[in-house]
Amino acid sequence: MTVPVVITGLGIASPNGLGKEAYWAATRAGRGGIGPVTRFDASPYPARLAGEVPGFAAEDHLPSRLLPQTDRMTRLALVAADWALADAGIKPEDTEAFDMGVVTASSSGGFEFGQNELRKLWARGSQHVSAYQSFAWFYAVNSGQISIRHGMKGPSGVLVSDQAGGLDAVAHARRQIRKGTRMIVSGSVDASVCPWGWVAQLAGGRLSTQDDPDRAYLPFDARAAGHVAGEGGAILIMERAEDARERGARVYGEVAGYGATFDPRPGSGREPALRRAIELALAEAGCAPGDIDVVFADAAAVPELDRAEADAISAVFGPGGVPVTAPKTMTGRLYSGAAPLDLAAALLAMESGLIPPTTNVDPDPSLGLDLVTGAARPARVGTALVLARGYGGFNSAAVLRSSLSD
Amino acid sequence: MTGRRVVITGIGVVAPGGIGVKDFWSLLSEGRTATRGISFFDPSPFRSRVAAEIDFDAEASGLTPQEIRRMDRAAQLAVVATREAVADSGLDLAALDPYRVGVTIGSAVGATMGLDQEYCVVSDRGRLDLVDHEYAVPHLYNYFVPSSFAAEVAWCVGAQGPSTVVSTGCTSGLDSVGHAVELLREGSADVMIAGSSDAPISPITMACFDAIKATTPRDEEPERASRPFDGTRNGFVLGEGSAVFVLEELQSARRRGAHVYAEIAGYASRCNAFHMTGLRPDGAEMAEAIRVALDEARIDGERVDYINAHGSGTKQNDRHETAAFKKSLGDHAYRTPVSSIKSMVGHSLGAIGSIEIAACALAMENNVVPPTANLHTPDPECDLDYVPLTAREHRTDTVLTVGSGFGGFQSAMVLTRAEGGVR
Amino acid sequence: MNTQPFTIDDLKRILLEGAGADESVDLDRDILDTQFEQLGYESLALLETSSRIEREYGITLSDTILADATTPRLLLDAVNAHLADGAAA
């Protein structure tokens, strides 16, 4: 029998709310955080909207020694990790160092930090590049900085699979806990809202060029024409169910199943692999499709990708067979931060008996989804499926089971 | 599924000094070095002007013009190494269920070379703050997300199982293979294409290592610049490369009559939780990773025949890991040959861990331990047997390989000869 | 090239810009002879600081100077010696 692993702490930095309470208050009410880019002048670019985390002043939360050496995504991640640990009631200083690890995901690293150093390099010369460029931009930096801040010496890691990576990290954290590590800080935070990041994302061809925040990111809608990029994510505290129970922790839910697949080579004509990822996750969780109360969709807002996702969901659950939602319509796509935030949303949905809505979307009926639109839908959420896909063909699926359900 | 034993049945290497396993092993076993003055760009403004570059011709290595256009150099190296590994394994991938074949590729710094060059263009050499998207290459997103490396390898082999990039700084190459082993053991895949790739020899990387004086300024004698464990060493030599393995379960490898290089019997990773670039001299966390890896392999430290060191050639590292070997293996550390191939192929950041695993498998295959080149002057604080200058014939059944990286990551892996029955 | 003497205030400004300050340390008290390590600055912070000094003052500090300058006073002396050399040359 495998060891049940649960989530006991949430730390959230989202465009529609900084901190768990603010995030959930906004999300359950369908209040979005997408707006014009403020972090740089986006007017020369075809995409001018973003989901930016509001009101985050790193110096209010972090020692000044850390500021010159950290990208925005690392600052957000460090603060979210502090909050997640506090939420879980875990004091790292009281825990054996080798019994705590950090497994995060990253999509593009500290891209803004890298941008600033590249500019110095090319404009002023190599002597102007910061000593911190040796690590501040790289993909492993958040795991490293969190482990240092909290003295965590256990197994750690960093997975990069674009948007799917957020679930891959959580699954890897669970793997390490099953192998014997007591607690892992997992989840992910990404932030690349900077000119250089913008140019790279524009090259991907999936950014929406709409200027109206309510019409820019419309997954599963006939008007779907790309997504809005956002920043943020969620840090999650994971531990063995037994340990959580013993220390009397509040348990949000169990990571009961996971599956990851990769799409066939473009042009192969074979079925995309998302359905298989869903089936693997359900099988591991011991769930029949009918046991799933809600699906948090990847929601690409690219018509053929929406179609592929809807087809995979319908193939498993039947047409309209399960409520589907995409609260990321309120935040934009957060890259590796997206799926951990969806996991957090699913856990909060369980707690409050509400499925948060997919905002602004008028569902394309031909997709055959029961999309939760308009307002949050009251529902008993005992089991949730979260989907995440990464550019190039990465598919990941995770099943969460409420601790309240038994 | 916990009884599943994971073995290496195919190896592909693209490293400085040669493309392919054969050239790679010649270089190592002959103790030659592939470090040289940087030729990729004008190194004159830099403090450190040496690197271990690969003479790599993507087209001659079999990549098509479109593959070359869309891939950063590191992805190209990975695909070439993958093709060699698959051919070497004799595995008929088309006959496998694609959902049972997965990919893990390690990389510390992703598409650094492509990003550096592209930034120069879209910013018009740093002139524009608001960089110009009209000048970006269409495949810039592939550079933005290094997960594209895993995607390219998956397409190359037709894998549809779990696929990802593992990025834990300079231990990425060990951790990527370690991750694949975990997926095989738990039954998430039957075959893993696992390895790593980095191609970091670009102005931004040289500049950031200059800034922390991590790379050697021994620019006058580039071929002798990388000298781990030598008393006169003063920094590492940046390298590039890729190594990829075909990993599968021992029984199925035996059933199909595959050549088995080695079993990956144990692996562990720990963090020092101390400093992003600094190491405490006691090596405690690396020692712990070694202890856990040996434990997982159910092997007594006394049985280790060879230690493939991280041996980057910084004073801090060499002392740190010497302490870790003593702490984890006790007196046996003094009796065990230890060497660093970074003396010959440089330090290719996230790639080197896999390249070193390849060196270990080949050391077992040949019962020859590769040397530490350029080691002339002993450092009294590094008092183990570092196999100076020339390779050594040595019965090698059990190997320990370690890595240490920025972010505090410390990893260890144990390889054994896959003979014998169920452990 | 800037040939003004390099003062403790210059050093504090550069330290703050390049590495921040440890919350438990008061840089405004007399720190001239306090070890950098006790002030909360480890080797990486000092490397960043020295490269900022090098850029701002147009000098090159050797590895030995940096290794030996373990307190603000020693670093000030080393930098000012360089600046004097530059002015004399």
Image (cartoon, helix red, strand yellow):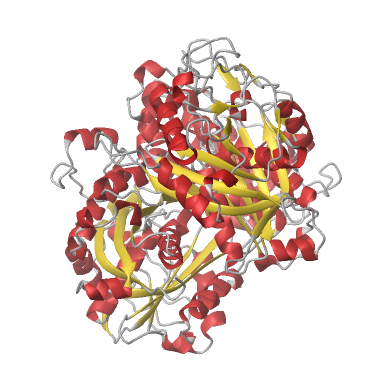
Foreground residue, A381 or B107?
A381
Residue B311, x across and y down, in percent? 43, 67
Residue at image x 46%, y 79%? B297
Q: Check the image and report above or below for B135 versus B256.
A: above
Asked whether residue A278 is in view, the answer is yes
Residue A115, x across and y down, in percent? 50, 30
Q: Check the image and report above or below for B264 versus B332.
A: above
Foreground residue, A393 or C35?
A393
Asked whether residue B46 is in view, the answer is no
Number of numbered discs visible in the structure rendering: 0
Foreground residue, B105 or B25?
B105
Please tell me in which quadrant of the rendered image residue A247 appears: bottom right
Residue at image x 37%, y 70%? B340
Q: Check the image and report above or below for B375 versus C87.
A: below
Residue A378, x across and y down, in percent? 72, 31
Q: Check the image and report above or below for A258 versus C84.
A: below
Query: Which quarter of the rendered picture does the C terminus of chain A lie within?
Result: bottom right
Query: Which quarter of the rendered picture does the N terminus of chain A lie within?
Result: bottom right
Q: Is residue A194 left or right of residue A302?
A: right
Q: Is residue B234 left or right of residue B373?
A: right
Please tell me in which quadrant of the rendered image residue C1 appears: top right
